[in-house]
């Protein structure tokens, strides 16, 4: 069931009653979940800009409803062709007594309600808990973060490829910028070319937020957005694997924003909010900000590509893997132990992917990101200085030896 409520109707709802974004909205149960979600959506829009701009409109889709529960998507759509992008959330609504309680992803009660809801699928429950940054017990009460890997500020591992088939080269038409333009965080990039087929960067559950806009919820608190798509999939919590078809690059702006040429507008999210791309890995490239939005570059080993430029999709970097960065050199020496006092045991080429078994401290060396005494033992038993390896982590990625 899809319901798009006009701005005037939503304003009437808002005048009747409101709540803060930190708490679920409540609207009389007789009106149905759409009215409560629209009310809550209006409140989010007001917090963002003080008032909805002319042309903005709530778009509410109730995709699952049974008994006292309803799930779906809520989008603040903007005027097609405008310079403002739409914003969107997953929602859960629960009829409690005489009113509907609503929570959007990223709000305090979303994971709690999802744990209790009879409509939340088994595969969704842990992902929603991770998006909230905490574990939720079967009874729906927030608990200890056991089993969830916290993503500290120094951990930028994503386990993601680029949003097209491995082995293809596409154009990075613009470097990191905001989801809606130049605003922070610079969470988004634009890509075009290749076979024009947009694919999931990592496995997860997928949702159609709006026409041409797909969101995939991944593990470890991450999610990814793909917008402007043509012939996109119509999904409601469907499981997708890494590389799954999501749609074709396009210029669709049904829910707002502008697109001057066919491309995919890609956005990275963490814990239900857009997060800066800089330092995160996609397709074994480390993304870098430029001096201003839409500039920037990507780094693979010592090879840097400046936007606009072409990127080869090397596939996802495993969470226990690294890319050799010789910092301008052609290769890095491997040793029989963690330091230059140990014998040579060959070399590994700049840009090569290696698997790390464990790490230990040894002699200090200076690479692209500074000086480190950490050495990583590779899966073949040899050792390489961490100063010459990009892993996405400032420290060990597979424990100490």
Image (spheres, helix red, strand yellow):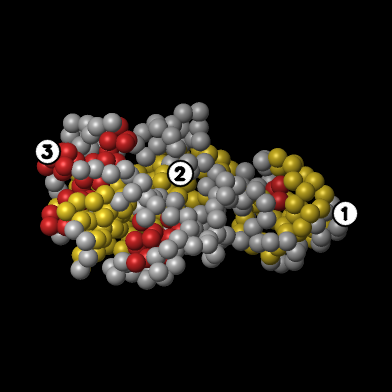
Q: Quadrant of residue 123?
A: bottom left
- Give percent across and percent down for residue 230: 24, 51
Residue hosting label 3: 8
Q: CA distance from mark 2 to mark 3?
A: 33 Å
Q: Quadrant of the N terminus?
A: bottom left
Disc 3 or 1, which lies upstream in sequence? 3
CA–CA distance in space, label 1 to label 2: 42 Å
Q: Looking at the picture, tell me which residue is in the foreground, 397 or 381.
A: 397
Left or right relative to 374: residue 97: left
Chain-order first, disc 1 or disc 2: 2
Which residue lies at the image location 37% right of the left edge and 71% below the top edge? 122
Residue 74 vertical placement versus 343 (above, below): above
Q: Which mark is residue 203?
A: none
Whether tag 1 and tag 2 are in contact, CB under 8 A, the answer is no
Find the residue positioned furthest to the top: 291
Q: Residue at x 65, y 48 (%)?
A: 394
Asked if residue 188 can be seen in this view, the reply is yes
From the image, which quarter does the C terminus lie in? bottom right
Within 10 angstroms of label 2, few (less than 14), some, or many (20 or more) residues? many
Q: Which residue is mark 2?
A: 275
Give whichever of 76, 198 is nearer the camera. Answer: 76
């Amino acid at each position: 069931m899809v319901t798009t409520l006009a701005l005037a109707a939503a304003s009437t709802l808002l005048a009747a009653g409101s709540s803060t974004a930190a708490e679920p909205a409540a609207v009389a149960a007789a009106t149905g979940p759409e009215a409560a979600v629209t009310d809550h959506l209006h409140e989010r829009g007001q917090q963002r800009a003080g008032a909805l701009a002319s042309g903005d409109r709530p778009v509410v889709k109730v995709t699952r409803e049974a008994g006292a529960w309803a799930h779906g998507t809520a989008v603040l759509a903007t005027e097609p062709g405008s310079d403002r992008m739409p914003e969107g959330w997953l929602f859960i609504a629960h009829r409690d007594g005489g009113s509907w309680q609503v929570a959007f992803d990223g709000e305090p009660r979303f994971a709690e309600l999802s744990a209790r809801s009879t409509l939340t699928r088994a595969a969704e429950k842990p992902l929603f808990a991770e998006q909230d940054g905490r574990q939720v017990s079967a009874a729906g009460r927030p608990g200890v973060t056991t089993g969830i890997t916290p993503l500290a500020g120094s951990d930028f591992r994503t386990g993601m490829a680029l949003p097209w088939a491995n082995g293809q080269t596409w154009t990075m038409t613009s470097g990191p910028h905001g989801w809606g333009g130049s605003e922070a965080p610079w969470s988004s990039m634009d890509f075009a070319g290749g076979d024009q087929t947009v694919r999931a960067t990592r496995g997860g559950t997928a949702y159609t937020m709006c026409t041409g806009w797909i969101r995939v919820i991944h593990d470890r608190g991450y999610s990814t957005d793909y917008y402007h798509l043509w012939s996109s999939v119509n999904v409601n919590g469907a499981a997708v694997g890494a590389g799954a078809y999501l749609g074709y690059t396009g210029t669709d702006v049904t829910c707002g924003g502008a697109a001057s040429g066919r491309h995919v507008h890609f956005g990275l999210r963490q814990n239900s909010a857009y997060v800066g791309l800089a330092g995160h890995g996609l397709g074994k490239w480390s993304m870098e900000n430029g001096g201003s939005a839409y500039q920037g570059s990507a780094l693979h080993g010592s090879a840097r590509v400046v936007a606009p430029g072409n990127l080869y999709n090397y596939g996802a970097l495993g969470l226990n893997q690294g890319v050799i960065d010789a910092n301008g050199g052609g290769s890095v020496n491997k040793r029989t132990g963690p330091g230059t006092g140990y014998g040579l045991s060959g070399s590994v080429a700049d840009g090569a992917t290696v698997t790390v078994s464990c790490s230990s401290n040894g002699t200090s060396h200076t690479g692209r990101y500074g000086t480190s005494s950490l050495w990583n033992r590779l899966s073949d038993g040899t050792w390489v200085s961490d100063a010459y390896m990009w892993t996405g982590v400032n420290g060990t990625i597979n424990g100490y030896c």
